[in-house]
Image (cartoon, rainbow, N blue to C red):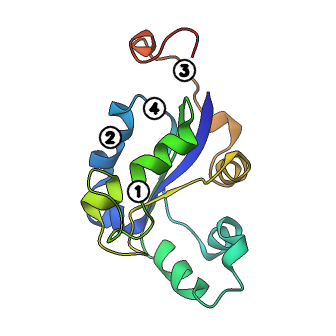
């Protein structure tokens, strides 16, 4: 099983799309193993987006991510990182395919609703920024045998 960090960004929270998007992840068979509402601080933003802090667009990114609460969660599942990123679609909602989360709900590059880790190392680093190990509740849903074969 693989884990990934998801942030339902301020635009997602403000537009009241959190439940809709969470239900898509659950319907896909991904397990929510951690979940909380929080306000991203400028300090947390700088840690999360460390590779972008020196770039000219960073101040706008920080203003956006700290502008309203986010919902942070950890999803777990087979190939969770790739599966989630495929479900999200292209970063720019105008270029995202219909049927993807961004294709269905976003029409902006920045107001694109959801952040998802882009690889295993990023996922581990980002999960540690938002959750203590004790906040992650690993469990085996009783419907797992109906979602994947025993050898997967």
Toward the bottom, the furthest residue is 56
The answer, for residue 16, to whether it is visible in the render is: no
Name the residue beneath numbered marker 2: 24
Could you tell whether 125 is left or right of 151 in the image? Answer: right
First reached walking from the N terminus: tag 1 or tag 2: 2
Give the label, 3 or 4, closer to the camera.
4
Q: Which badge, 3 or 1, is on the more N-terminal residue?
A: 1
Q: SS of the residue at dot 1?
A: loop
Q: Quadrant of the C terminus?
A: top right
Give the secondary structure at mark 4: loop
Q: CA distance from mark 1 to mark 2?
A: 13 Å
For label 3, the SS is loop
| Residue 1 left/right relative to 64 | right
The CA distance from mark 3 to mark 2 is 19 Å
Q: Judge depth for marks 3 and 1 and give the one in front.
A: 1
Residue 30, numbered label: 4
Rendered residue at 34%/62% (across/down): 12
Q: Nearer the viewer, mark 1 or mark 2?
A: 1
Q: Nearer the viewer, residue 104 or 141?
A: 104
- Horizontally, residue 30 falls left or right of residue 103, namely right
Q: Which mark is residue 139?
A: 3
Q: CA distance from mark 3 to mark 4?
A: 12 Å
Please tell me how crowded label 3 is: few (under 14), some (14-19), or many (20+) other residues with Cα within 10 Å.
few
The reply to whether residue 41 is in sight is yes
Q: Residue 148: horizontal and vertical position, in percent?
A: 46, 16
- Horizontal side of residue 144 vs 4, given as left or right: left
Look at mark 1 in the image and give the residue it sits on: 89
State which mark lies toward you, 4 or 1. Answer: 1
Name which residue lies at 35% across and 75% down: 108
The answer to whether the residue labelled 3 contacts the one labelled 2, judged by CB atoms less than 8 Å apart, is: no
Q: How many C-alpha atoms fall within 10 Å of the one at disc 1: few (<14), some, or many (≥20)?
A: many
Instruction: Residue 57 in the image: state x and y as whole percent.
Output: 57, 87
């Amino acid at each position: 099983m693989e884990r990934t960090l998801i942030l339902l960004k301020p635009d997602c929270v403000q537009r009241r799309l959190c439940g809709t998007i969470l239900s898509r992840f659950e319907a896909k068979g991904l397990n929510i193993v951690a979940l909380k509402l929080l306000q991203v601080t400028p300090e947390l933003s700088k840690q999360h987006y460390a590779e972008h802090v020196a770039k000219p667009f960073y101040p706008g990114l920080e203003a956006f991510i700290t502008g309203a609460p986010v919902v942070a969660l950890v999803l777990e599942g087979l190939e969770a990182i790739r599966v989630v990123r495929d479900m999200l679609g292209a970063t720019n909602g105008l270029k995202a395919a219909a049927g993807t989360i961004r294709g269905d709900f976003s029409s902006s590059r920045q107001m694109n609703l959801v952040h998802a880790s882009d690889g295993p190392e990023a996922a581990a680093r980002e999960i540690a920024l938002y959750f203590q190990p004790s906040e992650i509740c690993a469990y085996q849903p009783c419907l797992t045998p109906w979602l994947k074969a025993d050898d997967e």
